[in-house]
Image (cartoon, rainbow, N blue to C red):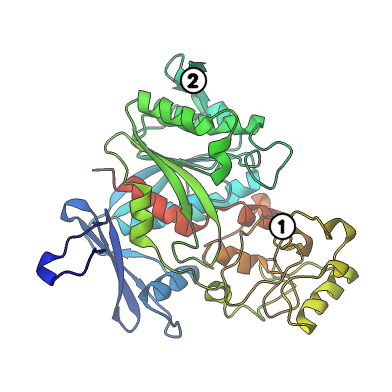
Amino acid sequence: MAYHGEVTEAQLLPLFDPPLSISYEQSRETSVRRTISLGAGRRHESRTFIDGDLVGDSWDRWWQSFLRGATTQYLGGRTRPLNVVDLFSSAGGLSLGVREASRALGYRFEAQLAADLDEHALATFRANFAPLKTVNASVRSLVDYQIESLHGRARFVDDPVLTFEASDLRDIDLVVGGPPCQGHSSLNNHTRGNDFRNDLYLTLPAVTIAANARAVIIENVPRVIHDSGEVVASSVQLLENAGYHVASGVLAADALGWPQTRARHFLIASREAAPMFFGDVVQALHRQAASIFWAIGGLEDAVHDDDILHSIPMMSAENIERVAWLFEREKYDLENQMRPECHRDGHTYPAVYGRLHPDRPAPTITSGFQTPGRGRFIHPTRRRVLTAREAARIQGFPDSFQFVGANGALTKSMLQKWIGDAVPSILGFNAGLIALETLK
């Protein structure tokens, strides 16, 4: 609670009354209790069991136990089903965080449908969320709609209609989705803000309205608001025209205590109530970022060539020399003479070939996390890049999360894409709290 001026206790005037608060308290030696307080005196309590060797405060112990595979138990009695549709699901990073939010608020996450073009990612989604149905096709195939824009205002020409593939969807509580963001990404200078894939963003409000879903969460990179087609503004108009209350904003993982400097833009809409203001949520839940070892500690020497999650790719002789140069000089950035010519003076991304700082959060994990020339991905204390398991933890995938491919196939490139493109589960968790709080 924030106060102003030097006043007596009787004169204290609250400047900020958070719309929600979360407290973590170690209730006994082997468990931590989490209490979420919402408006109108609503409280939800849950519990997780922790390893005895974890250090830090109760928040640290809860989320480190989550990364090691601990399961949340709701303490408020009978839980309610939450029927969820995940579009552009990939392996399920967004659903992972939303499922944790649903457990915290007394819901049973029940995936009704997941859709993605990647059949191997859908196999992983099935292994972890057991959806009633998966669709290995474009999300465009699930809904018929046409949009027109008049004087800067977007509207559906006719009400969107689910196609046969999705016509059996009933009683949907929540639609979630992260449409392809490469067209918006700052790493894509050629097509940024003007890419045909950006229009896929509009399939989320179309499916939401066609399915009469109670709420929707749409995530993307922060630059999506600068899209030349104004997909965010158009989505807000389409949803508001259909009677939804809409809020949007950016959530940053490091501002919520997570050991990664990754931010995502979220648009959240609900038919039943206005979502909480993002700024209030961020202020209420702000926490100093943890260091990278908070997530990957204990995995330094867990490297095994026979386990794809714990293996590392072979590096070229030049990259082995670059890594050795960093460690022998206790450096974290290569000097120009050690870089390839294309990464010397005037290069755009100075962190490439960089070594991770052990006492800082990691930078954004991308699908290039096992390639030194694609970012700061060299391990802080070992002469190698990150393993897939380490990158998965930084992204918020617990050790219990099963990565599998269709028909048993699983490759490093699949893992790199699924993990690097995912939404950190701490962001999905907080976005889920904002959306689910509106469901009365």
Labels 1 & 2 near each other (Cβ < 8 A): no
Give x and y (percent) for residue 46: 29, 65
Secondary structure, mark 1, is loop
Across and down, in percent, residue 306 comes to 73, 71
Q: Secondary structure at mark 2?
A: loop
Q: Which residue is mark 1?
A: 368
**Residue 229's spot in the image, x, y percent?**
58, 28
The 10 Å Cα crowd at callout 2, few under 14, some 14 to 19, many 20 or more, is: few
Q: Is residue 260 left or right of residue 420?
A: left
Q: Is residue 233 above or below residue 293?
A: above
Given this view, does label 1 or label 2 mark the residue nearer the observer? 2
Instruction: Give the vertical position of 77 relative to 379 (above or below).
Output: above
Residue located 57% across and 78% down the image: 297
Position of residue 10 in the picture relative to residue 404 (left or right): left
Identify the image quadrant of residue 12: bottom left
- Indicate which disc, 1 or 2, sits on the residue closer to the N terminus: 2
Q: Which residue is located at x 63 percent, y 35 percent? A: 193
Q: Quadrant of the C terminus?
A: top left
Residue type at tag 2: Gly
Label 1 and label 2: CA atoms lie apart by: 38 Å
Q: Residue at x 78, y 82 (%)?
A: 329
Of the numbered discs in the image, which one, if any, rests on residue 152? 2
- 10 Å neighbourhood of mark 1: few (<14), some, or many (≥20)? some
Vertical arrangement, residue 128 with respect to residue 302, above or below: above
Q: Nearer the viewer, residue 334 or 68?
A: 334
Question: Is residue 435 shown above or below 144?
Answer: below
Question: Three-letter amino acid code at disc 1?
Answer: Gly
Total marks shown come to 2
Residue located farthest toward the front when viewing the structure as drawn: 6
Q: Quadrant of residue 365?
A: bottom right
Asked if residue 316 can be seen in this view, the reply is: no
Q: Which disc is residue 41 wearing?
A: none
